[in-house]
Amino acid sequence: MSPHTRLVRLAALGATTALALTACGGQAASDSGAEDAPQGVVTRAAAKKIADHYQEVNNKANAARDEKLLGTVEAGQVYAMDQATYTLFETWPKKEQKAYTKPFSYQDREYVIPEKGTATWFAVRAKSSETSETSVLLVFDKVGGTYKMVLSLWADGEEPPELAVDRHGLAEAVDPGTKVGKLAPSEIGAAYEDFLETGGKKEGKALTSTKPVENAEQTYRRSSTEGAADGKATEKFFTKPPADPSVYALRTADGGVLALFPAAHKQESLLKESYRSIASLVPNDEQSALGATRGALITDTFEGQGLAELTPKTARITAVDFQHVDAR
């Protein structure tokens, strides 16, 4: 997961797919030495070593677009997204390709480590040597006995709140199924996707209006009124299970909960019946790279992740990041 990815990915989920119409035929944890002090999931030194290793291997994998190598340090939702990033690399402008393969480092790190027995994972809050104006929150979880990075959320103009830590410097992991107000962390992804699918008429009602939510609602309105291919095709969104459903949540200093969640959907562009005998939808370069061919229907699949702040009164999504992963 490179910081450059954020610059070249679809900005918000609902970015309109370009379709052409043509004629048919052709806080920091401590290393307390006290024997009675609770232990963290990992020590701070171990967390640093894991993050350092990830950074080194990620840079090498990005330079060569080696998804097998990347799979030794990434898993879950992020890995599903980055595999597609490698596939789409050749469709990018040369300037963006060069930026993506440039080595980077995570700086000003804060290791967020829950108490051992309360979680299997830990997080790192840091800034990148390439995008120092914003911070990123990385989640490392144990996958097959090895710690791998599974979620990576960049702050989108709004820094995450301060996290709660106990007197030993350990963070408090929260059960993703525990409701905080109207929603549990595990329900946030579906609530967000509801805005793309229905305009927020169902699960989305529980979300506070924020920039990511407003963008999703606007995408729904545009797609349901304008469709695709200059109105010659309909465009609809359908929520789907994410590649990895794992949700991670931490207590914040103000008593709320910070949730890192996955989300996914399909975007279907269907040529209206009156045009099917004389025209077809033609995939753009990105869709073609992901496997789409011309026809009456093109289905795009997006995998994503988001960051949300939950309190008894509000459920605020502050950042989302989606990747186009398939097209048929």
Image: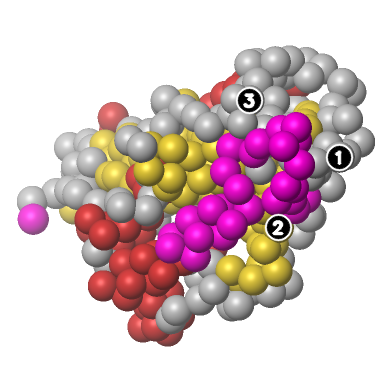
The magenta region covers: 26-54
Residue named by callout 2: 110
Q: Position of residue 47 (x, y in %)?
A: 56, 53
Q: Position of residue 115 (x, y in %)?
A: 67, 33
What residue is shown with label 1?
A: 167
Q: CA distance from mark 3 to mark 1?
A: 16 Å
Q: Position of residue 230 (x, y in %)?
A: 44, 50
Magenta stretch, main secondary structure, is: loop
The residues tagged by marks 2 and 3 sit, at their Cα atoms, a distance apart of: 20 Å
Q: Is residue 215 left or right of residue 267?
A: right
The residue labelled by disc 3 is: 118
Q: CA distance from mark 2 to mark 1?
A: 16 Å
Front position in the image: 300 or 140: 140
Q: Nearer the viewer, mark 3 or mark 1?
A: 1
Res. 186 visible in picture: yes
Q: Give yes or no for residue 130 being in the magenta stretch.
A: no
Dot 3 or dot 1, earlier in sequence: 3
Q: Is residue 30 magenta?
A: yes
Residue 189 image point, x, y percent = 58, 29
